[in-house]
Image (spheres, grey):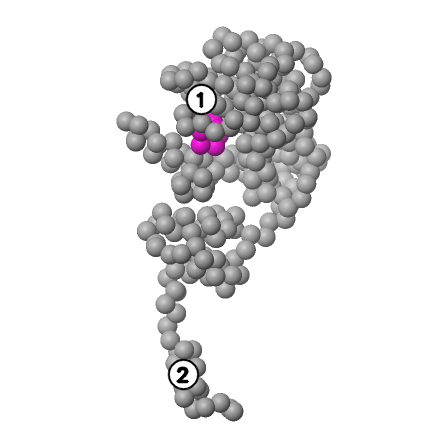
Amino acid sequence: MGIPESSYHSHIKMIQKENPDQELEACILSIFEENNGNYGYRRIHLELRNRGHKVNHKKVQRIMKKLGLKEDKFIRKSRKYSSYKGTVGTIAKNRINRRFYTNVCHQKLTTDITEFKCLDGVKLYMNPIMDMFNGEILSYGISTRPTLELALNPLGEVLEIVEDSKYRTTIHSDQGWHYQHNKWVKKLKENKIFQSMSRKGNCIDNSPMENFFGLLKQEMYHGEELCSFEDLKKKVEAYIAYYNIKRIKQKLTGMSPVQYRIHTSQLAA
C-alpha cells in the first residue's frame, strides 16, 4: 500500500468506528425535510435547541454540508402588484415612519396586496394583515380579483381581535386605492384605529409585509409548476398556518409567531 502498517490499521479502525453523530444527523435531516428544505443551518440550530440538543451552530453547518442539505428553491423576481391609482381618496400621513418595532401585541399592524399567477391566465390576489409585534398573520383575504372586499373582509376580522387591546392600534399600508377608499377610512375611524400610509413608490416604508411576501413566494411558489386557483389557495392557506404556528424565527428567540405571543403573554401575566 506504500504506507506504514500502523497507519493502515489506524485508517481501518476509523472506517469501522461507529459514527458518533448518527443520531444528530438523522434529527437534522428530519427537521430539514419537515420544513420542505426551507431551513438553513441557523434556523435548524435553533430548532435543535428547542428539542433539547446542545450543539454548536458551526457543527450543524458542517453536518448539513456533509449531507448535502442546502436550500435550492428557484428564486426569481416577478412583477409586483400595485393597487396605486393616484389620489382617489384620503392619503394618511406616515405615522409608522419605518418604526416597525413594538413590544406590545396588536399595537402596530401592516397590510398590503400581492398577486400570484395560476393556470389558464387566472390570478390569485391575497391581502394579509400582520402584527408587527411578532410577524403573525392575524387575518387574510384571497380572491380572483382585487376588489374592495378583499381588503375589508380581513379588516373586519382584525377589528374583533384588537378591540380589547391595551393601546390604540395603528394600521399601516401603501397608498393603494383600497386603503384610500371611504369605506376603509370610515371603518378605521369608527373603531378608533389610527391610519398610516407609506410614501408613494417607497416599498421600504412597508418592509415587514414585503419581507413576508418574499418568504411566502420563495418557500412555496417560485420554482413550482403553475396550478389551479383552488389548489394554490389551499397551498397559501397551509403555508400561513405553518408560518404562524411552526416556522421559527431567529429574532423571536427561536419561536414561531404564535409561540412567541403566548410566551410573552404568560410572562406578562
The front one of 8 and 202 is: 202
Which quadrant of the view contains residue 266?
top left
Foreground pick, 6 / 135: 6
In this picture, is 239 found above or below 178?
below
* 1 in the magenta segment: no
Q: Position of residue 186 (x, y in %)?
A: 55, 8
Dot label at residue 135:
none
Identify the residue shown where x is 57% and y is 11%. Answer: 185
Relative to 39, 93 lies left or right: right
Q: Residue at x 38, y 35 (%)?
A: 260
**Residue range corresponding to the magenta coloring:** 131-140
Asked whether residue 233 appears in the rendered view, the answer is no
What number is the disc on residue 10?
2
Q: Amino acid at mark 2?
A: Ser
Query: x%, y% of residue 150?
Result: 58, 21
Q: Which residue is mark 1?
A: 107
- Please, what is the three-letter code of the amino acid marked with disc 1? Gln
